[in-house]
Image: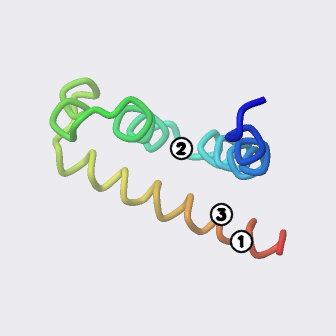
Amino acid sequence: MSARLPMAVTRLPLRVRLAAAIERLPESERLVVALRVLDGLSAIEAAGALKLTTREVESRLASALETLAGELGASLRRAA
């Protein structure tokens, strides 16, 4: 058994909460999070894929991350 398995198991609830929080984002923010964070695209690449300006991509990403931080922070405080 891998030594990393216990850590992965303990992190599972947070990952589940994160996935659920991402799903609740507005589609425009969810797409930016998917491209920038999950797929690792640059702001320029994401902007091209979504036909947006880089400023719009970064604004949507900032809004999404703020929402996610608020939701996960509240979720973690409840779990403690």
Q: Residue at x 71, y 48 (%)?
A: 7
The single residue placed furthest to the right in the displayed view is: 79
Left or right side of 20 for 63: left
Q: Residues within 10 Å of mark 1 (few under 14, many from 20)?
A: few
Disc 3 from disc 2: Cα separation: 14 Å
**Closer to the camera in the image, 40 or 45:** 40
Amino acid type, mark 3: Glu
Element marked by disc 2: loop
Residue drawn 57% across the image and 46% down it: 25
**Percent coordinates x, y for residue 19 in the rendering:** 65, 41
Pointer 3 or 2: first along the chain: 2
Q: Upstream in the sequence, badge 2 or badge 1?
A: 2
Dot 2: within a 10 Å radius of its alpha carbon, few (fewer than 14), some, or many (20 or more) residues? few
Residue 6, compared with residue 1, is above or below; it is below
List the residue tagged with mark 2.
Answer: 26
Q: Nearer the viewer, residue 65 or 80?
A: 80
Q: Nearer the viewer, mark 2 or mark 1?
A: 1
Which residue is identified by label 1? 74
Q: Are marks 1 and 3 in contact (CB under 8 Å)?
A: yes
The answer to whether 50 is drawn above or below residue 25 in the figure is above
Instruction: Identify the colour scheme used.
Output: rainbow
The spot of residue 15 in percent (x, y) is 68, 45
Place of residue 63 in the rendered image (x, y in percent of width and height, measured from the top left): 42, 59
Amino acid type shown at disc 1: Ala
Q: Residue at x 67, y 40 (%)?
A: 4
> Which x, y percent locates residue 73?
65, 70
Q: In the rendered image, which quarter is residue 29 located in? A: top left
Q: Which residue is mark 3?
A: 71
- Front in this rendered view, residue 76 or 29: 76
- In the figure, is residue 54 to the left or right of 18? left
Q: Residue at x 46, y 58 (%)?
A: 65
Q: Quadrant of the C terminus?
A: bottom right
